[in-house]
Amino acid sequence: MEDKRLERSFVMIKPDGVQRGLIGDVISRFEKRGYKLIALKMSSPTKEHIESHYEDLKAKKFFPDLVAYMLMGPVIAMVWQGTAVVSTGRKIVGATNPLDSLPGTVRGDFCIETGRNIIHASDAVESAEKEIKLWFTETEVKSSDTLAPETGGKTG
Ligand code: IDP
Ligand code: MG
């Protein structure tokens, strides 16, 4: 049966991904797969913002390093929409430790260190919605359907 899970995922290119010039490649992979970009911005978040994005990890030993890493430069924050985009997005991104990421994934193609793994993608529909709210206003994610594939480009 056809999978109708229309989802949204929060995907972020981390500071090292931005600095290494990987923005276009990452966007291209999600676009070519068939997902729709419904919001995008370059952002230089505060320490508090990053701490709240990663609040589930605040007890981890690596947390201070993670926060410092995320503050090394601007990030690209995005919302992607489409069928099963949360789980499929995680597959496109690859495993947390790039050494476990298969070639063909973003991390498997571009990095080798967990502490510099260039990209974030939501791990569940619930966390995706929470992250989207943290990074974007409602107006920013209100998609214009003018060019949506499902309408064949028709308006109205
Ligand atoms: P994910 O990004 O694949 O969802 P999480 O477990 O949610 O992985 O961890 C968030 C981020 O924290 C990772 O992407 C990575 O940048 C960093 N991180 C996770 N585990 C470690 C670690 O053991 N050492 C250093 N950094 C880590
Ligand atoms: Mg995570």
Image (spheres, rainbow, N blue to C red):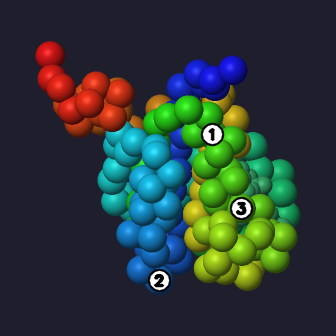
* Kind of residue indicated by mark 3: Gly
Q: Are marks 3 and 2 in contact (CB under 8 Å)?
A: no
Residue matched to label 3: 94
Q: For the view shown, which residue lies furthest in the left direction?
A: 156
- Badge number at residue 65: none
Q: Position of residue 122 (x, y in %)?
A: 63, 44
Residue name at image x 51 percent, y 74 percent: 17
Q: Quadrant of residue 24?
A: bottom left
Pointer 3 local density, CA inside 10 Å: few below 14, some 14–19, many at least 20: many
Ligand 1 shows up in the quarter that is bottom right
Q: Are marks 3 and 1 in contact (CB under 8 Å)?
A: no
Q: For the view shown, which residue lies furthest in the front direction?
A: 1
Q: Is residue 28 above or below residue 22?
A: above
Rounded to the nearest angstrom, the CA distance separating label 1 from label 2 is 25 Å
Residue 134 appearing in the image = no
* Kind of residue indicated by mark 2: Arg
Mark 1: is the Cβ under 8 angstroms from ligand 1?
Answer: no
* Kind of residue indicated by mark 1: Val
In terms of depth relative to the viewer, which is nearer, 31 or 62? 31
Element marked by disc 2: loop
Residue matched to label 1: 86
Residue name at image x 84 percent, y 57 percent: 60
Q: Position of residue 42 (x, y in %)?
A: 34, 59
In terms of depth relative to the viewer, which is nearer, 68 or 26? 26
Residue matched to label 2: 20
Q: Nearer the viewer, mark 3 or mark 2?
A: 3
